[in-house]
Image (spheres, rainbow, N blue to C red):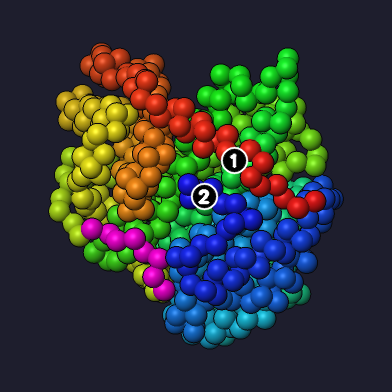
Amino acid sequence: MADLLLNPTTFDPTDLDPEARRLLRATIEWFEARGKTELKRVHHEREWYADFLDFMASENAFATLLTPESQGGRWDTARICAFGELLAFYGLGYWYAWQVTILGLGPVWQSENEQAKARAAQILREGGVFAFGLSERAHGADIYTTDMVLTPDGNGDFRANGTKYYIGNGNVAGMVSVFGRRADVDGPEGYLFFAADSTHPSYELVQNVVSSQMYVSEFSLHDYPVSASDILHTGPAAFDAALNTVNIGKFNLGFASIGICEHAFYEAVTHADNRILYGKRVTDFPHVRQGLTDAYARLTAMKLFGERAIDYVRSASPDDRRYLLFNPVTKMKVTTEGERVIDALWDVVAAKGFEKDTYFEQAAMDIRALPKLEGTVHVNMALVLKFLPSYLLQPTTLPDVPRRRDAADDAFLFHQGPARGLAKIRFADWRAPYDEFADVPNVAIFREQAEGLVDLVTNAGPDADQAKDLDLLLALGELFTLVVYGQLILEQASLTRLDRDSPDQTYLVDQIFDVLVRDFSAYAVDLHGKASSTKAQQQWALEHIRKPAAGTGSYDRVWQQVRHLAGSYEMRP
Ligand SMILES: Cc1cc2nc3c(=O)[nH]c(=O)nc-3n(C[C@H](O)[C@H](O)[C@H](O)COP(=O)(O)OP(=O)(O)OC[C@H]3O[C@@H](n4cnc5c(N)ncnc54)[C@H](O)[C@@H]3O)c2cc1C
């Protein structure tokens, strides 16, 4: 059986280019040689990871992976995701330094300021990192409001004053992309993105907001001079650059969740399988088997979905913006599934999950961050809901998106344009991959539930009042998201022949949909219980509760796969 989970001892992504493979292997070797004792020591002592960044610099890793073609490199989402997953496998902090570098570069690579772009490329070559200064303490998701104010100095330049909060790498970033507004221009025309230097005397590093290895800074600018060469975007384009950067960055969150869950999974299954209680292995308890099997099905589903979503991101163009749905699903669904995986594993490892020398104890905390970064789950679900009518009710014929692991530069990501017209985006018929797997019992049952959702939206959809009730809509959004999630899982299973070449894997698709059938039923019950759900909606909800197909043999086969993972990886001491 091919490894579906990242296992550092055997990891070699043959579909990536030789340099990416070398970098990934070298990074594994760096972490493993350093060992778990040291990984945990620096974690507990909240030591800034200068050695890690030195290693990244010595390997030219960030420059290789994060420089677009326009600056002599190649921005390849597939290898960026693989690298992010690997870093999170060893610790969210390492991933975070990389992630906020990606975010910080977003407004720069989207800019027409050639001088700033050349400077950024140079900083990357020198091993520097970047920061993204969007958030402020008082404003949260409300990025229309900013108190970073730029005042004209009378000579065509500006002086910036204000404070940013929650800004990763703000302690060392060679370039900090800062969002603000002009004091002399009201409304969207006044927005500005500019590049600040964290070593400038007018840049005050106030504090690290979190108690962690990573540095999530508060910084203040005091009459910080901003000249034309620092300005990245002005007016509405600055706002678009902020949103489009978040679009690029939030995709990575799902892969960080996957990396965290993978490492935690090895620890959990190995611990449970070695532990003897009442003369039996813990893995002999039926509920432990169920918990681990569900966690494995959820984790492999996260991977299958994420891998396929990469194809849509890499194939995006002004004419194909389907990625704008699959991207927030990656951010919101994959990361919340990550929480469920860790929850299930934690019930299995119990007290062990608190021990200071485990990866698990940090995973249990870190997994919570991903749903909350780059916009909350709610904000992303609200976005996903915008696509519901078009996706479910108006499918059209579109070119197939192939698997994309070619050595192309994903240039469109930096030319996404205004984030408008979402309701006009069209999707291919979601039923096609479900048809392909119609012989898999739980796919067939889930398909009935999904068809039911079309019926609900068509005949008993939200009325005018409900359309303003985001609480109710979120419940509907969960049901809708499952259909989208299932589509890409099946597409990936088909593309990788996961379903057909190996009998074990066919069972895995069935077991994944066993989980999705139960989830759909649970979300239907949730909709039923919403204060404002109508009689017709309540009736629909109860009618669409389904029991997964039992006795198909899938559960036992998948459990054998899970059991097989016990002892298959342990970080070097
Ligand atoms: C560890 C960490 C690192 C971070 N790093 C950075 C960084 O490097 N750069 C940066 O700029 N930011 C960074 N952030 C900020 C992060 O992006 C924000 O925390 C996030 O966008 C959510 O804002 P908030 O937590 O203030 O929640 P709020 O915006 O205050 O939200 C409060 C509640 O209202 C809901 N809500 C708000 N708006 C809507 C809406 N439109 N629709 C539906 N519900 C809504 C939310 O879901 C939430 O439940 C970081 C945050 C953390 C915790």
Q: Position of residue 439 (x, y in %)?
A: 24, 34
Looking at the image, which is closer to me, 301 or 195?
A: 301
Residue at point 78% right, 55% down? 35
Residue marked by disc 2: 3
Asked if residue 502 is positioned above or below residue 466 in the image, the reply reads below
Q: Secondary structure at mark 2?
A: loop
Q: Amino acid at mark 1?
A: Leu
Q: Is the residue at mark 2 in contact range of ligand 1, meaning its CB lies under 8 Å from it?
A: no
Residue at point 18% right, 57% down? 398
> On the picture, is 567 further left or further right than 257?
right
Precedes in sequence: disc 1 or disc 2 = 2
Residue marked by disc 1: 565
Looking at the image, which is closer to me, 248 or 202?
A: 248
Q: Position of residue 127 (x, y in %)?
A: 67, 76
Examine the rendering and report whether any part of residue 557 can be seen: yes
Q: Secondary structure at mark 1?
A: loop
Residue at point 38% right, 44% down? 502
- The magenta-colored residue range is 400-407
> On the picture, is 70 further left or further right than 196?
left
Q: Position of residue 80 (x, y in %)?
A: 51, 64
Asked if residue 469 is positioned above or below residue 499 in the image, the reply reads above
